[in-house]
Every structure is written in C-alpha cells, then in structure tokens.
Image (tube, rainbow, N blue to C red):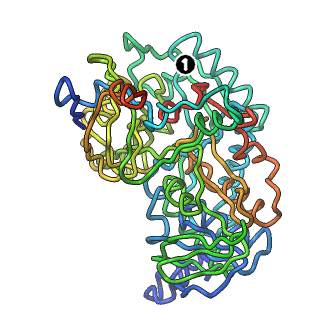
Amino acid sequence: MLIPHPLLGLRDSQEFTYLGDAALMQRPDPAADGAEAAFCDYVFLRDNPAGVHRELWFHEQGDRSWLVVTRDTTTHEILGAELASNLKLGAAQ
Amino acid sequence: MKFSGFKVVKEALTGHKGWAPLWRNPAPKAEYDIVIVGGGGHGLATAFYLAKTFGELKVAVVEKGWIGSGNAGRNTTIIRSNYLLPGNQPFYELSMKLWENLEQETNFNSMVSQRGIINLIHTDGQRDAYRRRGNAMMISGAGARLLSRDEVKQMLPFLNFDNARFPIKGGLMQPRAGTARHDGVVWGYARGADARGVDIIQNCEVTGFRIENGKVLGVETSRGFIGAKKVGVSVAGSSGRVMAKAGMRLPIESHVLQAFVSEGLKPTIPGVITFGAGHFYVSQSDKGGLVFGGDIDGYNSYAQRGNLPVVEDVVEGGMALMPMIGRARLLRGWGGLVDMSMDGSPIIDKTGIEGLYFNGAWNYGGFKATPAAGYCFAHLLATDHPHEVATAFRFDRFERGYVIDEKGVGAQPNLH
C-alpha cells in the first residue's frame, strides 16, 4: 500500500507503524463523571467497520509524523491522508 | 450411513452406488430453539455438541455461503495445546483431548495426525520462558519436552542451526500436537449434527437481529425471518460487522492473516516447526505441500487478502530457518480474516442482550480450538453457564482488569 503523505508524497506503508482507529485521538476527560467507564470504552472497544475507516499511522521511518489515513478495509484502497497534528489543531479551535 | 472399512470395500465392489450426501439441504423452518449464526468449524461443532451432548432437538446453523467457506478453509490446520496462562491452557487441553477422539465421535476421517510441534529456542532467556511454559503445559496434562540442540538436530537436520542472528539452541516440544484436515473437520461435524436433526441452512445470510425490549426474538436473513429462543453468533473474523447489527461494539479489530503452500514434496518435515523469532512456522500436509505462514499484516482489514511485504517477511523467515525451502515453488497463498482481541484471547460469553450469545475473538488460533469452542459454546447455550475451562473468556474481563494477555503487549491488537 502506498500512503499519500501530505508533505512527502506517496510513501510505502512499510515505513509506517499502525496504531488503529483515529477515534483514539479523542481521549476522554479523566476528571469527568463516569471517566472510568469512558476510559474502558476508549481503551478496549472499537467500531471495527467493514468499509471506510479513519486510522492512525506513524511515519516511523520517515518524518515521524502521525497521519490520519482514510482507507477502505474491504479493498485496502487508500482514500486520503492528513497530518494528525493539523486535525488536532483544527479540533482545538 | 456409517463409514467403516467394510463399507469402503463393499462400495468398491458394487460400483459406489451406496454413498449418500453427508447432510440434507433443508429450507429454514419458522422457528428453532437455538439458531447458530456461522457455518464454520466452530458453529457446526457447537450444533453437533448441542444435539449430541446437551440433547437440544430444534437447532439450526445458518451460513452466508457454503459451510467451511470462511476461516475453516483458510487456516494452517495446526492443533496444539501449548499455552501458558491458567485462563487459556486448560481450555486448549480440553480441545486437544476432543481432537484425539474426534474421528470416533463423528465417525468421519478428519485426518487428525499427532506428529508433534517444536517451538525453537535461540537464547537462554527464551529457554527459561519455554521451560516455564512447558511446566504450565505439564500441569494441565498436555505434556511437554524440552529438547537440547542435539535432539532438535536429530529430528530436524535440515534446519540452519548456526544462523548468525538466531542460532538454534533447543526447542520446546508437545508430542501430542499435530495437524488435522480442515475440511474433514467441518464435514465431520456437519454430518454428525445433521444426523442428529440439526438443520444446516446454507446460502442464508444474516442481515439483522430482531431484538425487542432487550431480548432477541430471532434473526433476519436473506431467506426470511427465523425465530429463535436463543441465538449464538460464531463468525470469528467478521464478528465486528455481524455484532454491529445488534448494536454492539466489541473489544476486537478484524485483521488479515496470510498463509502459503508449496508444491507437493516427498515427506520432509516430520511435525510442526515454529520460528517465532523470525515470524515463520511450517508443517507438511498429507498431500506433501509445505504449509507455512507468519504474522498478521497488522492493519484493520476485511479484504481476505494481504499485501506483499508480509509475503516477503514470511519467506525471509523461511529462508533463514531452512534454506532448502528456497528450492520449493510456491503454489498458493491466501488471506483469512481474524478477530484480533485486545488481549489476544477469545470470548465465549452471553451479551447484554437476553438470548444473544457470542463466540469469537479467536485471533489467529481458532482452528485448534474448534472442538472445545464448540463444546463450551454449546454448554453456555444449553445451560446458561460457562463451561469450567472457559470461565475466563468473558466480555467483562477487560473492564474488571482480568485480561488474558499471553504476550503481555496490552490493548494493541495488531501486536498479539
């Protein structure tokens, strides 16, 4: 699989390590009510969809950036990739 | 129709006119006591033991395609009970005992062949870990032998013992482990279940569950609604997308695991060899092909095919361990879907929905578990209590902190 890195162009997926569902970027608030149950869901449960999946890839053997890659899990077709740091900044604003 | 040597000779002399189909092909009835979703090895074994051991009379197995067309036909047919942790090992040892009696129990040749498995040792630390594992195996009754380098050399003289990175220093052997014929297992259980009245309904895809007031009433299928007092889902690999139809999120990611087979060769490899350090394991089928594989590809997938980097990784492992494999031509490669759970161990449990039961999260080890998973899932469905060797395989073990993490890598499914 080739991942279209927003800064570096098409890169072999072998340069990356895989973490999983991009929902992991939304960590629950540890001070909120019911934080324990929320963290249990956050750590252990996954949507695991058959189809379009947004997921975190780390460019370990490259520029060491985290990407959010959109990929179809039924075909392995990659539909896009964004810098996770940009998404995080966008979400904070 | 009972299979026997006498029957084979009789049919040979009378033109093979007495063979009958191994199971019926019934239309679904309006209602059953228990509907099993998934006609793989696990689902059919569950139906078999429900009918045979637990006396359930109105049982159906519904299967999207034809029976055994999923992971039951996509594994590397290894059977073993060489686990470490107390939540796992007694379960796999029960499975091993059921394998040993499977052909007598089903009156079907499943080609169970106990030719032994050897996990190779390369370092002192690994020897200590395997000695501990061997002790756990002996406590459970599975038996184990710690082999010296010379003993391994005697059994497997073709291995590269002096690889610079991973020289072979010994091995942990389970002599009772081995292989079985995957289709034979499926067909044996299907025939045995069918003979005891189980309806095996093929080409019948479950499209949803009918759930009212937190209780399951049956399954919606491509062949209409089928009512059921209890529904057992046994679709490992696709658990995520099937249970999503019941509104459940699972502690599971679906991944793809590849396997390969070479052209047929003369008998070369006496048993199963695993080279964990190099992500490679191999055995030889009765037809002569070398059957081998390695790690999962490592990203979520429902594609039933993998990518080339893992092919390269597996083949490199093979060349490092047994250079002679380079002379064999690769015949086929394939990918199967695996439920990778958050601790690398399975789930056989009730769900939060009354009457809906789940068997899955088998990671890359579902085949060897087939008899015991069927037996324990049948036990749960029939009695509403987990079998004593499957009490640890609960959904709530994650939130309670009782994970069964054989590898100790935490909630990172692609590393198990």
Residue found 52% across the figure and 53% down from its top: B240
Residue B287 in the figure: left or right of residue A11: right
Residue B378 at what x, y percent from top left? 73, 63
Q: In which quarter of the image is the N terminus of chain B?
A: bottom right
Quarter of the view holding residue B226:
bottom right
Observer-nearest residue: B113 or B357? B357
> Between A78 and B93, which is closer to the camera in this rendering?
A78
The residue under label 1 is: B170
Q: Residues within 10 Å of mark 1 (few under 14, many from 20)?
A: many
In the rendered view, tell whether residue B284 sits above or below residue B402. Answer: below
Q: Residue at x 55, y 44 (%)?
A: B252
In the orientation shown, which residue stands out farthest toward the left? A9
Type of amino acid under label 1:
Gly
Q: In this view, does B406 lie above or below A70?
A: above
Left/right of residue A69 with respect to residue A25 in the rendered view? left
* Camera sees residue B267: no
Q: Quadrant location of residue B321?
A: top left
Q: From what the image shows, is residue B30 above or below residue B281?
A: below
* Callout 1 secondary element: strand
Please, which residue is most extreme toward the front here? Answer: A93
Q: Which chain carries label 1?
A: B
For the residue pair B216 and B339, the one nearer the viewer reads as B216
- The spot of residue B125 in percent (x, y) is 59, 11
Q: Which residue is drawn at 57% across and 80% down?
A: B7
Q: Where is residue B375 in the image (x, y as percent from the top left)?
A: 72, 59
Q: Can residue B71 be seen in this view?
A: yes
Task: Tell me what residue is drawn at x 65 percent, y 70 percent.
Answer: B211
How many dots with numbers? 1
Residue B357 percent coordinates (x, y): 69, 61
